[in-house]
């Protein structure tokens, strides 16, 4: 489970997102980070039972830095008021699809997919969807998947990309520039003893989609 004090720290950080406050509360940050990493370690252990590629990974391979890159942003807040972790066979820098966990009081979710891939990878995914659309539909348009995740999300083009006809049955998916899904988590669930198992169940339901996307990437 995730300790309530970790959520409290993130709430306080959101209200005091500045360097003096952060430095004065460094011990609280260190404790929250360690708590989140123990949760991530639990998820990794569960994933490794069905996907051997996770066996050698550690929490540090998955957790994102809390420090924001503000060079090209109008928002100059120096810190993220959330914790995030990305689980994939290649670690955080893997350019294929993976699982994601977002810890943010009132906005937490478990999800995954392929976010804003490079043009050559995006082209491969679109081709895979076009060539094997019935397989893709069998994953994302069945009732259990839609109940858990809704629809596949992502920024999209106004028209189908060049090389595809507007009437293509897969047009709505071919217009996507990302292919992600998510399942919202209530704060009360985050601090329950079953949170790791719940995330693993969500990721298991997501695995066919990730396998499809990574088949295109590979």
Image (tube, rainbow, N blue to C red):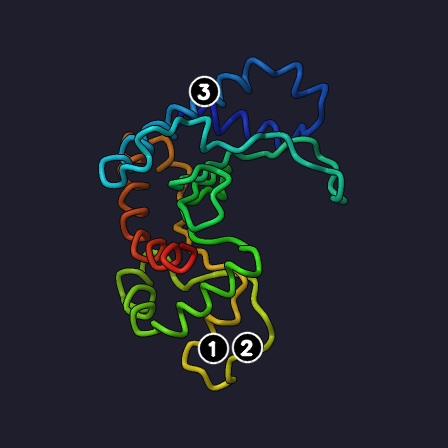
Sequence-wise, the earlier of marks 3 and 1 is 3
Answer with mark 2 or mark 3, whichever residue precedes in sequence. 3
| Residue drawn at (51%, 26%) of the image | 8
As measured in the structure, the alpha-carbon distance from the residue carrying label 3 to the one carrying label 1 is 44 Å
- Residue at mark 2: 160
**SS for callout 2:** loop
Q: Which residue is mark 3?
A: 34
Q: Position of residue 213 (x, y in %)?
A: 39, 58
Image-based side of 49 in relation to 120, left or right = left
Rendered image quadrant of residue 155: bottom right
Residue 1 visible to an observer of this rendering = no
Question: Label 2: few (<14), some or many (≥20) within 10 Å?
Answer: some
Q: Residue at (60%, 15%) from the top-left corner?
A: 26
Please state if 189 lies on the left or on the right of 7 as rendered.
left
Q: Vertically, is 159 above or below 121?
A: below
Q: Which mark is residue 171?
A: 1
């Amino acid at each position: 489970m995730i300790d309530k004090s970790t959520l409290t720290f993130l709430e306080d950080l959101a209200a005091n997102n500045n360097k003096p406050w952060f430095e004065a509360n460094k011990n609280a940050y260190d404790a929250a980070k360690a708590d989140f990493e123990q949760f991530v370690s639990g998820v990794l252990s569960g994933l490794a039972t069905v996907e051997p590629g996770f066996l050698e990974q550690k929490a540090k391979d998955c957790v994102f830095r809390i420090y924001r890159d503000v060079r090209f942003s109008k928002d100059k807040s120096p810190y993220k008021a959330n914790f995030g972790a990305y689980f994939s066979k290649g670690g955080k820098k893997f350019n294929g699809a993976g699982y994601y966990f977002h810890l943010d009081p009132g906005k937490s979710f478990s999800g995954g997919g392929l976010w804003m891939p490079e043009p050559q990878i995006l082209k491969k995914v679109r081709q895979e969807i076009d060539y094997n659309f019935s397989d893709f539909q069998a994953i994302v348009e069945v009732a259990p998947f839609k109940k858990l995740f809704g629809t596949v999300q992502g920024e999209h083009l106004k028209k189908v990309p060049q090389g595809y006809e507007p009437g293509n049955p897969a047009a709505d998916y071919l217009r996507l520039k990302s292919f992600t899904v998510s399942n919202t988590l209530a704060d009360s669930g985050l601090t329950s003893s079953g949170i790791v198992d719940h995330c693993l169940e969500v990721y298991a339901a997501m695995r066919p989609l990730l396998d499809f996307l990574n088949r295109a990437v590979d």
